[in-house]
Image (spheres, grey):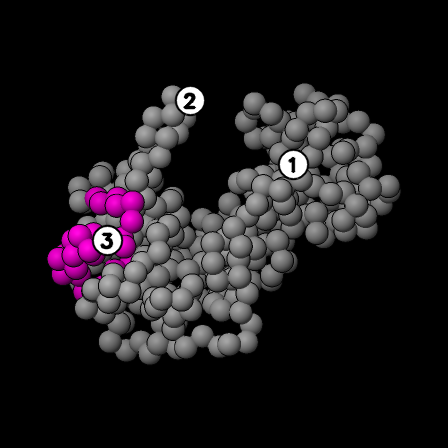
Amino acid sequence: MRLVFMGTPAFSVPVLDALVAAGHEVAAVYCQPPRPAGRGKKPRPSPVQARAEALGLPVRHPVSLKGDEAQADFAALGAEIAVVVAYGLILPQAVLDAPEHGCWNIHASLLPRWRGAAPIHRAILAGDAETGVCIMQMEAGLDTGPVLLREAVAIGAEETTGGLHDRLSALGARLIVEALARRAELVPEPQPEVGVTYAAKIDKAEARVDWTRPAVEVDRLIRGLSPVPGAWCEIAGERVKLLGSRLAEGSGAAGQVLEGFTVACGAGAVEITRAQRAGRKAADAAEILRGMTLPARLD
């Protein structure tokens, strides 16, 4: 099929690769404009732009799609379908209507649960047992469109957002290729009105660990915010990111270091398995402890 691809971050790259490998014609790739990055703050292309250019595909990165000219340029591509995954811009109705069969979105949750910006983070933070990917026919509402295809996956007991992100990206790539191949037989399924939740963007204010909370909540926070933005605590005045954890045996005063990198919480305890000191690379807990003596209690 003749497609337009719309995506920006690393999550979207495997999808683009899968569409090209399946033999679809990608008329153009839309992504967010390059952003200043690094010490020199030089404009850096997004992962999708870099991959599209490596594949020799034409790239467009308009600041907005609301103008008549941008919408006319999009319509002139003559796409049969636009595949959208973590693009980052709202699509006006004129854009949604331009492709012959509309715009299909790859969403990393089991809709209607976790509509919105941060579905992977929120699923882990909430302690969900499973999540998945939906291929959705887009409409004007926020992730409200009917679902064409879905597949669920279990969330591992020690899984982080980073690990789940990669699994769902690969799943989305496989599902969109399957959905396009089965387009004629798929029946759009309206989302139920019951069970709607919204995955609000992660606020950095959520990231500080509160050891007075139950261990199950602290564990979810650490795994749910790993690797970005990273849950954190202060250790002897140093801000340390906590990037991996598991529930552990033991109890004590909130914040008390019990053994190794196991810390007592308001109820139960959490073992930190991976962390990152300020200005250093992330490392397993054993390596962190070789270069750092933990105080009796963490803040």
The residue at the point 35 percent across, 35 percent down is 35
Q: Amino acid at mark 3?
A: Gly
Mark 1 residue element: strand
Residue 170: x %, y % from top left: 39, 53
In the shown orientation, is residue 299 left or right of residue 107?
Answer: right
Measured in 3D between alpha carbons, the distance from the residue under mark 2 to the one under mark 1, in whole angstroms, is 23 Å
Residue 246: x %, y % from top left: 68, 46
Check contact, mark 2 vs mark 1: CB within 8 A.
Answer: no
Query: Which residue matches tag 1?
Result: 232
Query: Which residue matches tag 3?
Result: 67
Query: Which residue matches tag 2?
Result: 39
Front tag of 2 and 1: 2
The residue at the point 59 percent across, 48 percent down is 224
Is residue 148 shown above or below 167?
A: below
Mark 3 residue element: loop
The residue at the point 17 percent across, 52 percent down is 69
Is residue 74 visible to the viewer in this orientation of the structure? no
Instruction: Tell me the quarter of the image containing the C terminus.
Output: top right
Residue 146: x %, y % from top left: 38, 73
Front tag of 2 and 3: 3
Is residue 146 shown above or below 78?
A: below
Residue situated furthest front in the rendering:
67
Check contact, mark 2 vs mark 3: CB within 8 A.
Answer: no
Measured in 3D between alpha carbons, the distance from the residue under mark 2 to the one under mark 3, in whole angstroms, is 34 Å
Q: Who is closer to the viewer here, 75 or 244?
A: 75
Measured in 3D between alpha carbons, the distance from the residue under mark 1 to the one under mark 3, in whole angstroms, is 42 Å
Give whichever of discs 1 and 3 has the lower sequence position.
Answer: 3
Magenta segment:
59-83
In the shown orientation, is residue 111 left or right of residue 29?
Answer: right
Residue 36: x %, y % from top left: 37, 30
